[in-house]
Every structure is written in structure tokens, then in C-alpha cells.
């Protein structure tokens, strides 16, 4: 599967932004999906994940501000980001795993088989 992330841009603190990740290929519904981000000089960290059954997981720093969702008919996963903060500035990547996510695997980079190219999000103060 190929992933194409979009929706990044420059926003102000407190604004909202929705990222999209379109997947090509078949059987999108068979993939668990995740969003990760990488700030300059830092490691890539998990933001959120959604399973085949649409169970969602979030990193602690999200604090209820972000929502991950998927539309299997459109082969797309979304990340709605509200109340954004300057520390949310990063390149955001979507990722896909062929199959189920178990336990804490949702948060591990190595759990995902496919990665998109990333979209830059900049939050100004």
C-alpha cells in the first residue's frame, strides 16, 4: 500500500487543522493506521492509532485535543487537531500495518509496515 499525507500548513496557537492520509491499493480496511510526528532534532513519536475495528489510541500529550478517524470507503485516515500548540510543530507521518495491533504495539514504529512521506505542520505562538 502507498500512503499520501496532506493537510499540513502554518497555523496559530489555538487553531485547528485536519490531516488526511490517502492509501492506494486494495483492502484498506485490513490495515491498522497510525499517525506519528517528528520535530526537528527529535525522534519520531506516535501521536495516535486506529485499529481495524476503529478502536483508537492516543499519546498522552494529545490530552483530548486530537481525533483519529478512518473512512474505509475513501481509503483515508484523518487526524483532526484542535487547540494546537507551538510544540505540535513537526512533520506528521501516517503509517499502516497489515493486520491487527496488539497491546502496546500501536505506539511502536516497528509495528507499521508502510509509511507516507510526511506533511509539515507549523504552529506559531
Image (cartoon, rainbow, N blue to C red):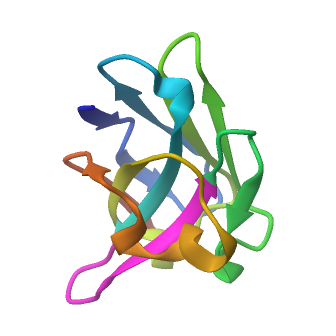
Query: Does residue 107 appear in this view?
Result: yes
Query: Who's the residue at 36% across and 44% down the image?
Result: 8
In depth, the one of 95 and 31 nearer the eye is 31
In depth, the one of 7 and 50 nearer the eye is 50
Left or right? Give the position of 14 relative to 1.
right
Query: Who's the residue at 62% across and 31% down the image?
Result: 70
Left or right? Give the position of 49 relative to 25.
right
Vertical placement of residue 120 versus 6, above or below? below
Q: Quadrant of residue 43?
A: bottom left
| Residue 48 colored in magenta in the image | yes
Picture coordinates of residue 39, whole percent (x, y): 31, 77
The mark total stands at: 0
| Residue projecting furthest to the top | 73
Picture coordinates of residue 57, whole percent (x, y): 71, 63
Query: Who's the residue at 45% across and 76% down the image?
Result: 108
Image quadrant containing the N terminus: top left
Query: Does residue 119 appear in this view?
Result: no
| Residue 57 colored in magenta in the image | no
In depth, the one of 99 and 19 nearer the eye is 99
Left or right? Give the position of 41 relative to 113.
left
Picture coordinates of residue 3, whole percent (x, y): 28, 35
Query: Who's the residue at 42% across and 64% down the image?
Result: 36
Vertical placement of residue 33 versus 65, above or below? above
Question: In the image, which residues are magenta?
Answer: 38-49
Picture coordinates of residue 48, whole percent (x, y): 59, 61
Amino acid at each position: 500500500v502507498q500512503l499520501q499525507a496532506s493537510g499540513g500548513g502554518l497555523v496559530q496557537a489555538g487553531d485547528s487543522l485536519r490531516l488526511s492520509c490517502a492509501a492506494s491499493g486494495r483492502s484498506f480496511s485490513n490495515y491498522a493506521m497510525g499517525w506519528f510526528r517528528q520535530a526537528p532534532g527529535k525522534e519520531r513519536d506516535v501521536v495516535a492509532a486506529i485499529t481495524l475495528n476503529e478502536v483508537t489510541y492516543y499519546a498522552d500529550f494529545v490530552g483530548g485535543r486530537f481525533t483519529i478517524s478512518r473512512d474505509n470507503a475513501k481509503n483515508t485516515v484523518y487526524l483532526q487537531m484542535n487547540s494546537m500548540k507551538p510544540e505540535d510543530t513537526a512533520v506528521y507521518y501516517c503509517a499502516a500495518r497489515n493486520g491487527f495491533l496488539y497491546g502496546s504495539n500501536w505506539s511502536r514504529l516497528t509495528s507499521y509496515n508502510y509509511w507516507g512521506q510526511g506533511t509539515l505542520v507549523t504552529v506559531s505562538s
